[in-house]
Each structure stands twice: as structure tokens, then as C-alpha cells.
Image (cartoon, rainbow, N blue to C red):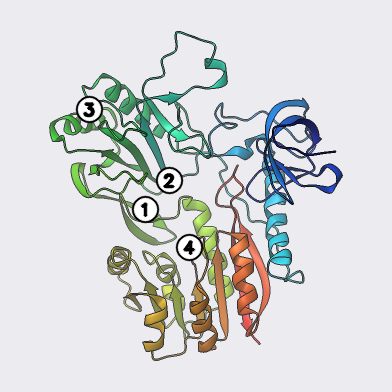
Amino acid sequence: MSIKKRSVCELEIIDLAYGGKGLAKPDGFPVFVDRCVPGDQVRVKISKKKKSWAEAKLIQILSPSSLRQTPRCRYADFCGGCKWQSIPYETQLDYKKQHVVQSLAHIGGLSHVPVLDVIPSDPVFEYRNKMEFSCSARRWLMPEELADETISKDLGIGLHVPGTFDQVIDIHHCDIMPEQGNAILDHIRQFIRTSDLPAYHLRHHTGFWRYVMLRHSVAFDQWMVNIVTRDKHLPLVMQLAESLAQTFDNLASIVNNITDARSGVSLGKEEIRLHGNEVITERLGRFEFEISANSFFQTNTRACEKLYDVVARYCGLTGKETVLDLYSGTGTIPIWLSDQAAQITGIEIIDTAVADARKNAAMNKIDNCRFLAGDIREVLPDLGEIPDVIVIDPPRVGMHKDVVARVLGLGSDTIVYVSCNPATLARDLEMLASGYEVMEVQPVDMFPHTYHIESVALLKRR
């Protein structure tokens, strides 16, 4: 079969690629198609053609796969939040494990490493403790709405169509956040619709209302509402806050972040507390953490506990060891391990995260954790000790090669590597392989109905 850009062809989807797209291989040539399930027979239009692969857009499912199921969410095929709802959850886990195995083998040359079955999330819906919705002056229409001339393209509050910055789906019900969040979001939508100020225009950078960010505490059933606006208009946002507080009795925090930055981030240049506290409180195991509007916290609380249990098991602590935690963030891993080790040192480059980590340790009456602010490459040489165990939990881009060199130079007995990206996990483990043997990898599902997968790798010094 000749694959040419803009040509229309019929394909059989045979696999799921990392990134969530279906994979067809006509005459051995890889073609990636979104919104497809292995076993689908589809008609597609080639949208991008490269020397060794192509991308195509789905036109029609000619014959659906036996795997295919009806998504619970009407937006699942169009928003980027949970594209795998068409696949049974047990099958999702199989593909996630396969992606870890393939990345280790093809990128890291580590085909011999045992990869255990994925630890599932429970629940698989209503699991996200944080959702961020964009406000748009012009919303994207669902396919069934296109023919209805009475439907307005005005205000939309929701998630972006994947690959776009200005196409926002007006989402009235999101199944991956707790149910009450939908009622809170709808209340805000109705208020914004009747307010005198418009939503933000994502192309013209005008308008007032920019984002609605909701956080939920599983342990205490508290909510935080963060209203992000382009300008300061305290009387109007205070009116919204009062209306929310009167309607929902478990809103522990309502804040207003203000930013006129053109970049698509909700971090405000100024934050104003409108109702309640500036934080909400969450619990992991026996430890409590205060979470502010802009602080990082794992978005699946229950699965996070499973992840940290794996980290603790791989660390194998007896209470006598020293632990070094790189990319320590707000201190959740050191605090989780605190009653199993003699001393734990966390290193983090973001000053506000370090401040949060110290505050969280003090709140939990922990005195064997210290947190150092700075670039790991600069802080490690002055550490003055060789830790027994190193825990590494880097961002998606993985470790800088200079950090890898510093870690190898320490020569600790055990490394526990936590990764949210199988590709950079494989790359970094290959770089560490000169000094360490990878004993096994345990994937943990934090994000049901997406291709994302967390993994924990146990490394022992050769």
C-alpha cells in the first residue's frame, strides 16, 4: 500500500503505541491513528508523512474491535483527559506494562529486566484530586452540535482539544474528578455567564475569566476553588466566592489568582484569599500535608499511597540507614520514609517547594528530614556523606547526564528510581547501568483511562 499525505485508505489497527494512539502497519510501514483500539478496521486520511512513519486522522470505524466498549464520558473521544475509556481497564493495564517493557528493551537495551504486573488504581473513576479547566470566550462544538444553528459558540469552560491552544470543550460532567466537582464547576459557569465581564479570548488575550482550578482532599472531603483572572476585580470575585460558600458547605478554601501572562499557565502573579483558608489538608498514610493552590501534589491520592509503599519496600530500610531523595518536591517521599530511616536529606531546586517540605515535616513532628534548596549538580558535591539509599523522582524529562554522573560517583548501595515516563526511565537506567544492576520494575497506575504510567525501579550497586 502506498502511503501519501492527504490520501484516504483503509487500515487495521494492530497495537497501541506509547502516547495512546492506535498503530497500523500496512506493508510494515507504521501509521499512527488517534481514537482507535487494536482490532478496529478504519478509514483514515493521512495527515503527516515522514520517511519512516505517518500519522492519520480517523474518518470512520468500518468494523469495531471486539475490545471496544462505549465510553462512560461523552467527551472521551475529543478531550485529552481520558482517551482510553473505549478500552476495558484490565486491558489498559496490559498495554501499560507492555509500554514499560518495550521502552526498557528498545531504548535502554534492558530486555532482561523483570517488569511486574501493574498495580491498579482503585477507583478508576473520580480519582483525580486536582482538575484545571480553561475559560474561553468561544467554545469548541461537539460533532452532534455542529448542525444545530441555535447553539451558541460563546462561553466554554473545560479542557482543550488535544494539540490546540484555543479550542476548549465546554465540559459539563467530568468522570475522573469527584462528582461534587461537577456541581461546583456548573455553579461557577452560571455565575460567569451572567457576569458583566467576558471569558478570556485565547487568541486575542483579552477578557477577564481565565481558569477554574478545583482541588479535593480525599481524607477530609474538603474542596479548594482557585479562580484565575486576568485582572483584579475584587468585588466581582468576592461575590462569586460568597455564592459558592453559601451553596457548598465543604469549601475549605477559595482563592483568586491574578495573571496577565500570555502563556497558558494558571500560576498567578498575585493571590488573594476570598474564603476560608489558603490551603486544604490531605493525608497520605498517617501523615498530613497542607496543599496550596499552586503547590505540587500527586493527583491520585489513593494510588500515591500504593506508589510510596513500593518505594518503601524497595528501599528496604531498617531504621539505621541514611537516605538521599533527589527532586524531593514538597517532601512527600522523605516524610513517608521518615519513620523507617535514621536520616533523610531531600534536594529540590524550587524554593517554594522546599519551604512547603519543611513546613510539612514540622506539621508532622518529623525531625530526621532536612531539605536543601538548589541545583542537584551543585548541592551534591557538598553533601559530605555517602547515603545508603538514593531515591530519585525526576520530572518527565528525566535526569540530566551530569546528575547521573554525580549519582554514580556517590556509590550508594541502593537506588530507587520513580518515573512517570517509560522512555526517560529506560534512558536513565541505561546510563546508570555501568554501576548498577536493575533488579526489577514495578509499574503503578496513577492515571486510569490514559496512557500514562508510573514505574518504580530497584537498582543495586554492582
Pointers 1 and 2 in contact (CB under 8 A)?
yes
For residue 162, above or below residue 279 = above
- The three-letter code of the residue at mark 4 reads Pro
| Closer to the camera in the image, 209 or 239 | 209
Mark 4 surroundings within 10 Å by alpha-carbon count, few (fewer than 14), some (14 through 19), many (20 or more): few
* Residue 127 appears in the figure: yes
Name the element at disc 4.
loop
Q: Residue at x 35, y 40 (%)?
A: 213
Q: Which residue is mark 2?
A: 129
Residue matched to label 1: 282
> Is the Cβ of the residue at disc 4 closer than 8 Å to that at disc 3?
no
How far apart marks 4 and 3 lie (CA) works out to 38 Å
Q: Amino acid at mark 3?
A: Ser
How far apart are the two marked residues, 1 and 4, measured between alpha carbons? 22 Å
Residue at numbered disc 3: 243
Image position of 286 (left or right of 267):
right
Q: Which residue is mark 4?
A: 395
Query: Is 61 in front, or is 338?
Result: 61
Counting residues from the N terminus, which is met first, the one under dot 2 or under dot 3?
2
Q: Position of residue 285 (x, y in %)?
A: 44, 60
Q: Earlier in the sequence, mark 4 or mark 3?
A: 3
Residue type beneath disc 1: Glu
Real-space CA distance between mark 1 and mark 2, rounded to the nearest whole angstrom: 10 Å
Query: What's the distance in space between the residues labelled 4 and 2, CA to CA?
Result: 19 Å
Residue 323 disc label = none
Residue 343 horizontal/vertical position (percent): 40, 82
Image quarter where the N terminus lies is top right
Query: 172 or 402, which lies in front?
Result: 402
Label 3 residue SS: helix
Horizontal side, residue 125 vs residue 45: left or right:
left
* Dot 3 alpha-carbon crowd within 10 angstroms: few under 14, some 14 to 19, many 20 or more: some
Of pointers 1 and 4, the one earlier in the residue sequence: 1
